[in-house]
Amino acid sequence: MTNIVRNNGALSALLGSKTSLHTNRRWALFASYACLIVFVIFFLCPPFYMLVTSLKTNAEIANLATNPWLIEQGITTEHYTHLLTETAFLTYFKNTVIVATFVVAITMVISVLAAYALSRLSFWGSGVIATGVFLVYLVPDSLLFIPLFKIVGGLGLLNSYWVLVLVYPTLTVPFCTWIMIGYFASIPKELDEAALIDGANHMQMLLKVFIPVALPGLIAATIFAFTVSWASFLYPLAFIYSDNQMVLTVGTVTTLIKGDVFHWGGLMAGALLAAAPPVILYAFLMDYYISGLTSGATKG
Amino acid sequence: MTVSGVSRDFPKPHPSIRGGAFYLWFRRRSTIAVMMCFPLLALITCLVAYPFAYSIYLSMLNKAETAFVGFGNFLFLFKRETFWLVVQQSILFALVAVIFKALIGFIAAHAVNTIPSKGQRKWRGMMLVPWVIPPALSTLGWWWLFEPTYSAFNWLLEEFAVPAVPWLSDVFWARFSVILVNVWVGAPFFLIMYLAALKSIPEELYEAASIDGASAWQKLVHVTLPMMRNIIAITILFSIIVTFANFDIVRVLTQGGPRNSTHLFSTYAFRVGIESGDIPLGAAVSLFMFPALAILAFVILRNVRQRTVSI
């Protein structure tokens, strides 16, 4: 008898806790959505405002009486057409594409070769090199731009975008090597033994086994190298000053501002167009990049 | 299959290559490995290690780079009030920004992890936008938001009858603004790392905690935080390095002003070294970052090592 009563008590306690769990869950959901909405407004308000400004007429931008967050006097694309036809924006774009393409190619060759050697062909000093690569990844561009300024000046490369092709790999190669080591190390050893038995040499093994299997890592590394070379600001600001050698970040920030009056509409249009390629790339390949980033950090 | 049949299949040195010793040396694992690492080593030696050593040498020259002055540049900096302002602001900037980035990243990661998994991708994608735009360009947008006459923030404040804020011309608000923009750019990185870490915590641990009657807070303190301790430590250390060495935001937003109050080591080194043409002094300024970076790198490396060993 007492036993049953006790069981009943336990049962009702259990049911009670279940309903409270249910309300807890609803509260957690509510709080989560509230946080997310606040954060999304915070994170998206500058790009939204840039877009709004870039589509407004100059008269409306200058008019202090209107709501700056809305377009009330009609949408215009004049800032975009002006940007593409009457400024050096397309030259900057072309230069940036050239630099980014070369940097990505150089980075991938260097880091895939090194990552293969460091993850599979353990040799005297390979551990030290792997640690060194990690440490070099932590070296920021702001530590070395002054000696590099002197060095590239000595090489006669100052004020040419090829200097960026030379120095950007110092920013991209260490991280790309690092995540490729992680991806290659996760490939089972049986696979290369099988390839060795089939008579493959190291080059064939790398090209026909490792690269296809580690393709997601390769894509993540490529996106990283592309983004860094697209977004880098300090090196081009320090090394390049001519309009025809300029890249997008510095070109937009420095030359589009010239003049007595800031052309805010044109400036925002330029910033948005310049930011578009990496944003579009992320929209499609976000998952690859995130997996690369998190695996690079956690495997390390 | 006879023994001779097997031996025939073994690769033999090609007869056209003279000197089997060279061929064997060439085929050795370590030779191949070193050759494959050579481009990486050349890059690091020529464009990282050499510039670093050169930077130390440069920092000991006079402005015209004609005479050796030893630690003269460093001692000169110690006597400059601006330099101490830079030291103070760099530390303040890095610590405050990283704390807020970590907090926002942690809360946002939790929020994303709580909602049904169907919507998670969409919310995460929207919150990663700041991190995807090149910082120099998004800072332009912030600059326009802070613009004294047209500031859209001040317009909003006025709607609520709050007086306009001098975002970039007042020392306190200028420091606030550069930190705010840095938090905006960097918080999504924490979100990604923490979300990945949250997802890797086994569900059983939470179930066990629930059975033991743990509250949500107890689960956070006794399950989530211990499981994420490593990733939190590494992310924060890494972010301190990146924030401490930041250049783009301050350069675009305030150029170090008002009255040099927002300069970081990097922007001050740029001002002194490139713009004013005193390359040795600029090299000395940026070298001051090195001890802090080296200590942080050492701690990260130890953390990473421990992690690898424990796995």
Image (cartoon, rainbow, N blue to C red):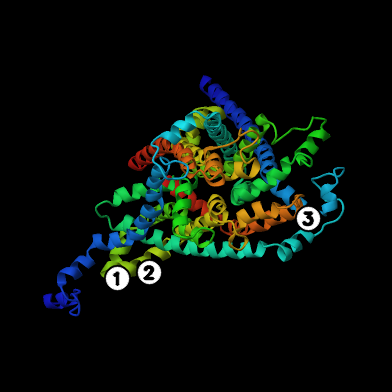
Residue beneath disc 2: A208
Residue farthest bottom in this picture: B16
* Residue type highlighted by circle 3: Leu
Whether residue B215 is visible? no
Residue appearing at x 35%, y 38% in the figure:
B306
Q: Are marks 3 and 1 on the same chain?
A: yes
Q: Which mark is residue A200?
A: 1
Q: Between disc 3 and disc 1, whose residue precedes?
A: 3
Whether residue A56 is visible? yes
* Residue type highlighted by circle 2: Lys
Q: Label 3 to label 2, Cα distance in Å?
A: 50 Å
Which is in the foreground here, disc 3 or disc 1?
3
Q: Which mark is residue A236?
A: none
Residue beneath disc 3: A55
Q: Label 3 to label 1, Cα distance in Å?
A: 58 Å
Which is in the foreground here, disc 3 or disc 2?
3
> Dot 1 lies on which element?
loop
Chain on which label 2 sits? A
